[in-house]
Amino acid sequence: MGEEEEQEMGDLYALDFDGVICDSCGESSLSAVKAAKVRWPGLFDAVDSSLENWVVDQMYIVRPVVETGYENLLLVRLLLEMRIPSIRNLELMTVGGFIRKVAEGLTVEGILESWSKLKPVIMEEWDENREALIDLFGKVRDEWMDKDLDTWIGANRFYPGVSEALKFASSTIYIVTTKQSRFADALLQKIAGIQIPPERIYGLGTGPKVEVLKQLQKRPEHRGLTLHFVEDRLATLKNGIGDTILRKRERKQLPFQGFASFSSLTSARS
């Protein structure tokens, strides 16, 4: 059977979760504030409700830089240190040959432009551990769900038409996300009213997305299917495009809803 004939056999969908299926920014921002209060309690001594609301509002703007949930905690602290100079530690970075505090002079636009450089600096200077922050973020979410599931669910929303599309899809769908699987599964059941088998949800800890996509393509039952990867982070899509194994029969899509920044959408168009 020729390659063109195989491509007509059907489609296979690998969908990111946050920013493609679910607008989770409200929940992840509130959970990040809750977790930040646990991790850095002294930081919030000078924080009132209005400042806390300001942080949550700013989190909607900087959300495009987040690849994995724990980064939300770092952003909460960084935003607070930008707003209240007195709570800054002596975290330092080199900029143009000079040493200065990370938060000093930093803007939201600066975070959007330089997060990949900022993150390792603050992780080191704040003496933070990635796995510990992931565990804390997950624990805070679990506690919120246990205490008030309806409010936790209500802080998330699915994009219009997504629930119906998932329910009536005729093609096989996989979820490939950096979100912890149990949270994606809970939201799919509670909001969309569907249950995707656990073996079709690849969450945090299952490996890089590019490797997951390779695994899906290699499965015998997927032979001849065209894989559609829908992801709202342009950097992740570019990573897949750069992989020669994935180029052959994979289509990548950047949604115009979700957490993609304007610059990412513009770049994708060009």
Image (spheres, rainbow, N blue to C red):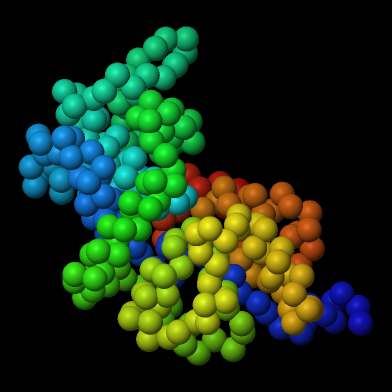
Left or right of 79 on screen, residue 218: right
Q: Position of residue 81 (x, y in %)?
A: 24, 30
Q: Position of residue 254 (x, y in %)?
A: 54, 60
Left or right of 256 on screen, residue 141: left
Left or right of 148 on screen, residue 166: right
Looking at the image, residue 96 lies above or below residue 204: above
Task: Pick the residue in front: 26 or 255.
Answer: 26
Q: Quadrant of residue 37?
A: top left
Count of residue discs: 0
Task: Pick the residue in front: 15 or 90.
Answer: 90
Q: Position of residue 230 (x, y in %)?
A: 56, 65
User: What's the residue at 18%, 40% (across, down)?
Assistant: 41
Question: Is residue 118 at all visible to an observer of this figure?
Answer: no
Task: Pick the residue in front: 201 or 250.
Answer: 201
User: What's the residue at 29%, 61% (across, down)?
Assistant: 141
Looking at the image, residue 58 lies above or below residue 6: above
Left or right of 117 on screen, residue 125: left
On-image quarter of the N terminus: bottom right
Q: Position of residue 233 (x, y in %)?
A: 51, 53
Q: Residue furthest top?
A: 97
Question: Is residue 51 at all visible to an observer of this figure?
Answer: yes
User: What's the residue at 73%, 70% (across, down)?
Assistant: 217
User: What's the residue at 13%, 42% (across, down)?
Assistant: 51
Q: Quadrant of residue 85?
A: top left
